[in-house]
Amino acid sequence: MDPAAGPYITGWSALSPFGVGREPFAAGLAAGGGEAVTDPEHGPGLRVRDFDPASLLAPRSIRTLDRMTLMSITVAGLLLDEHADSLGPRSGSVGLVLGTSTGSIDSIVGFTKDTFVQDKPYFVDPAAFPNTVINGVAGRTAIWHGLRGLNSTVSAGHLTALATLRYATRLIRRGYAETLLVGAVEELSAPVALAAGRLRETWAAPARTSLGEGCVMFLVDSGATARREGREPLAAVADLAFGVTLPDDPPWARADHLAGLIESVLRRNGLEPDRIGAVSLAQSGESDLDEAERQALDRALGADHGRRVQVSRQVGDCFSALGAFQLAALLAEAAPDARPALVTSLGADGAAACALITS
Amino acid sequence: MSAGLAGDGAARGARRVVITGIGPVSSIGIGAERFARGLAEARSGVRPITAFDTAGFAHTNGCEVADFDPAARLARLDPDSVGRAAQFAAAAAGLALRDAGVDPARLAQVPGLISVGTTDGESQDLDRLTELCVRGGLDELPPRLVRRVPSSWLSASVAHEFGLRDVEAVTLPTACAAGNYAIGYAYDVLSLGEAEYALCGGADAMCRKTFAGFYRLGTIAPTACAPFDVDRRGILTGEGSGMLFIEPYESAVRRGAHIYAEILGYGLSCDARHPVAPDRSSIVECMRRAHRNSAVRPEQIDLISAHGTGTKANDLTEAAAVREVFADAAPPTVSIKSMIGHSMGAASALSAIACAVAVDRGFIPPTINHVSTDPECGLDCVPNTARRADLRIVQNNAFAFGGNNAIVLFGRCDERTPAREVAAA
C-alpha cells in the first residue's frame, strides 16, 4: 500500500436479497442462484431477505424511520461495528456519502397521499416529513450513528454509486475527510414496482432482470489513514471516467461512447486490455442498454479479456444501488483476482461511466 | 479527521476558479439583468400559488416563477421529456452560458462538470403520480411521467440541452444547502484540474408535498417572508434555478471574459443531531471551515447572504452563530428569501448569484418586508432598500434538513487585486 495513493476501500457490507451482511451476499453469489422473494404487498421483485430492522436495531426506537433509512442505518452499523476497534472514538468524525436516486419514493408518495385523502390537506405526519426529502436517509443515518463528519447525498441514476465514489474520493484527495462511509441504497416498494412496471412495458424487449433493492456501503480511507489505523486495503478506486450521449445520437453511439471511456481509463493508467482481470457489468435489464454495454466491452477489451461478472442476475436491477453491488461482487469473490478490474454503467438518461478498481 | 474541511494545503497552489456567467430563473426575474434589477429594486416575488390546488389551506402565498415558457427557453431538449425542475436547470444553464459569452459547441471540446443541487427533484411529477395513485388512475400512470422522476435528470438534461458529451453530470440532493454543495464541488473539480469548466447550481419546482409539510410544521408565513424581523412568521415556498458558469481564472482572462467574482473556497458540516432543527455549533464550525478553506479571516468579510428563512428558529440560530464567529463586528447580513421565497435546492445557488451581482455591481441586496429587527438577532439586515457598498469578500450561508450545512465564499477579482491576494494581505 502506498500511503500517498488511495483512497482505499478498507471494508464493506451489504443488505441484499441474500440477507443481512457481507457473508450471505458473498455466499449467495458463490452459490450462483438468485431466488426471487416475492411479496404480494410490494409487487414482484427481489427483496432484501431476513431484514427485520426492529430486532436488528433493538432496543432503540425506529418508529419515525422509513424502510430505506433503516436499510442505510443497518449497513452503516454493520460496518462501524466491524471496525469499532480501529475506529475507536474517531467513529464520531467519520463522514457519509450516500447515493440514492430520489430517496424513498414510498415515503414521498405516502406523505403526499395524506394531502389528498385527509380532511385537510395539511393533515400530514410531521415526523415523516424529513423522510420525504432526498437527503433524509443520509441525515438520519448520521444522526443514528453520531457521524459528524461530512455528509452528502449524490444522485446519478444507474451511475449513482460510481458518481458517489467519485465524489467521496475527491473529498479525501482534497484533504476534507480522512474516513468516509460511501455507498448507495435503493428501496423496492409498491409505488416503485408499479411505476417501474409501467415503464418496463414501454421497452422494446421484455426486461431481462427483476427489480431489486438493497444497500451497500464501503469504508473508504485516505492512504495515510489506512496505514495509521492499520486497516488493510481491499481495493482502490484508481480512476473513473464519465460521459453522456445525447437523445439524437445514433443508436450505436452508446456502445462507442462507453468503449471510448474504457479506452481512456486504460490509456491514462498505462494498461493494455489483457491486464484487466474482471469486468463487473450493470446489465440493468433494458435490452438496448445491455447490448450496448456488452458491445463496448468487446470493442475496448476484446471478447477474451476481462472475465464478465453480472451481479444484476442475482440481485436484480437495484437502480441507484446497482453500481455498489457491482463493486461489491468483485470484492466478494473468494479468490480475488490481483489484476485490475472494471465496473461499467449505462443510464437511461444517456450517461455512461467506467471505474478502474485496483488491489 | 479533526482537520475537517481545513484544506489550506489543498487550496494553495491549486487553480483559481471564477464566475463568468450567471443564470437566474427566479420569481423576481429571469436572466442576469432582470434578477439584478429585482434585487436592487427590492422586488417581491410573492403571489398566490397556482402550481397545485390550494383548497383547504388558510394561507396560500408562494414565490412561483410566473411566465416560464419551457418551449421558448429550451433549444434542443424536448420540454415534455423532463420535469419542471430539470427545465429550470437547463434554462438557467443556458442563461449562464449566454451571459458568459460561451458557445456550447466550443464547450463540447473540453471536459466539463455539471453539478445541480436539489431538495425534491421532480416534485411536481411525484405529486402527480401520487394523485393518480389516490384517484385510482393506475392504468393511466403515464410512463413518460415515471421516466422523468429520477433526480439525475436535473444534471443530465443540462448536458442534453447543450450537446455536452464529455461531461460528468451529477445531481446533489442535499436539500436546502444543495446549491452551495454543487458550487463547492464544482470549485473542487476545477481547482484539481479535472475539468475545464462547470455549470453548477441548483433547481427545484414548487410542490404540494413540501408546502403541506412546512404548513403542518407551522412554518409557512401567512402573507410575506420577513427574515430577522421581530414579527417574522416563517417561510414562503418558492421555486426556480440558479446556474453558474465557472472556469479557471486563466481561461477567463485568456478569453477576456467579464469576471463577476472568484470562488475563494467553501465549508461543509453536519451536526448529526436533529433532522430539521438547525444547530448553532455546527453552523459555527461550517463558517470556520469555509474561512480556513478560503484563507479568509472573519473581519475581511463585507457581507453575509444569510440562509435567513424567516422562521423563528433559523434566524435566531443563524444570527447567534454569526455573532459567535464575527464577535461584535458582524457584517451586514441579508436574506434574499424575503424577495424570492425559499426556492429549496435553488435557494443557495440563487443566493450565490446574488452575491456575484453584489460584488460586481457594488450594492447590497436588501431584506424586504422588514419593520423592526428582532433584538435577539441583532444584525444589520439592510432593511427594505438596497445599499451601495464596496464589497470585496462575501459569504453565502446555506443550511438544510438532515443537518447538511454548506457555506461558500466569493471575492472580487479585478486584475490588480486578485481576491486571494486581498485575503492574504
Image (cartoon, helix red, strand yellow):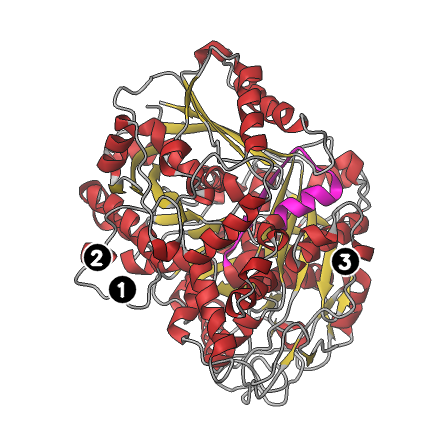
Q: Mark 1 lies on which chain?
A: A
> Along the polypeptide, which appears first: circle 1 or circle 2?
2
Provide the secondary structure element on which disc 2 rests: loop
Q: Do the residues labelled 1 and 2 touch (CB within 8 Å)?
A: yes
Query: Bounds of the magenta span?
Result: B154-174
Q: Mark 2 lies on which chain?
A: A
Which mark identifies residue B70? 3
* Residue occupied by mark 2: A57
Provide the secondary structure element on which disc 3 rests: helix
Mark 1 surroundings: few (<14), some (14-19) or many (≥20) residues within 10 A:
some
Name the kind of residue labelled 2 in the image.
Answer: Leu
Return the x and y of residue A266 as percentages of the image width and height: 53, 18
Q: How far apart are marks 1 and 2 (CA)?
A: 8 Å
Which mark identifies residue A62? 1
Residue depicted at 27% across the width and 26% down the height? A30
Dots 3 and 2 on the same chain: no
Dots 3 and 1 on the same chain: no
A149 in relation to B166, above or below: below
Residue depicted at 77% across the width and 67% down the height? B29
